[in-house]
Image: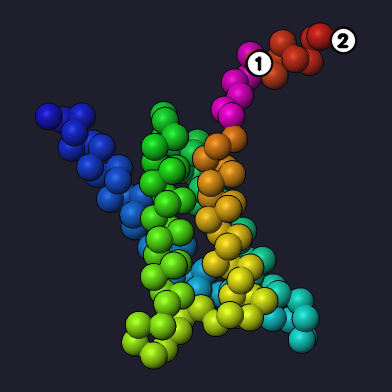
Amino acid sequence: MKKKANRLFGALMVAGRATFVLIFGTILHQSTLGDQLPVGASLALLLTMLVAMEIRISSDSRTDGLFFALLLAVMLFVIGQDFWEDKMLPSNQNGLIWSFGAPLIAFAITAWPRLSKDQWANRARQP
């Protein structure tokens, strides 16, 4: 029973992190420096990468990372729709970078293999 409660708490924490990344990434992604440099989209993707890496490092399995990436993709899809005649994600370059880049980064970090120190040490000794 305690293990099930820990899983539920972990899932709620991942959902909170995904919501945090979604809110701040959506706010940040429209910021540009000058006319062309998408600084906000870069910061939003960096935030996504750091949170996904933190989830990947702190969890024992890939389930939390997959849940984060899938939840982020679904929430980005929902806020990108025109349900209430007010789009949160405009279909410009920054909006496309944010809406497609964030889930791709989260899925890539989740799919990346976990390498231990022993594997690195063995690889370094081989010619």
Whether residue 42 is visible here, answered yes or no, is yes
Q: In the displayed structure, does residue 98 sit left or right of residue 54? A: right
Along the viewing direction, whichever of 37 and 54 lies nearer the viewer: 37
Q: Image point 59% across, 44% down: which residue? A: 108
Q: How many numbered badges does the structure rendering display?
A: 2
Mark before the other along the chain sequence, 1 or 2: 1
Magenta stretch secondary structure, dominant: loop
> Residue 116: within the magenta?
yes
Q: Residue at x 30, y 42 (%)?
A: 10
Q: Position of residue 13 (x, y in %)?
A: 32, 50
Q: Are marks 1 and 2 in contact (CB under 8 Å)?
A: no
- The amino acid beneath tag 2 is Pro
Q: Residue at x 53, y 56 (%)?
A: 103
Q: Which residue is mark 1?
A: 119
Circle 1 Cα neighbour tier, 10 Å, few/some/many (<14 / 14–19 / ≥20): few
Q: Is residue 33 above or below residue 53?
A: below
From the top left corner, tell me how far across and down residue 71 is, in percent: 39, 55
Please identify the residue farthest to the front as the structure is shown: 82
Residue bearing mark 2: 127
Image quadrant holding the N terminus, namely: top left
Measured along the vertical axis of the image, is residue 85 above or below residue 119? below
**Label placed on residue 97:** none
Q: Amino acid at mark 1?
A: Gln
Q: Residue at x 51, y 78 (%)?
A: 89
Assess whether residue 93 is covered by the magenta stretch. no
Packing grade of label 2 (10 A; few <14, some 14-19, many >=20) is few
Is 126 left, or right, of 52 in this rendering?
A: right
Query: SS class of the residue under badge 1?
Result: helix
- The x, y position of residue 127, in whole percent, is 87, 10
Q: Residue 116 location in percent, x, y?
A: 59, 21
The answer to whether residue 20 shows anywhere in this view is no
The magenta span reads: 113-118
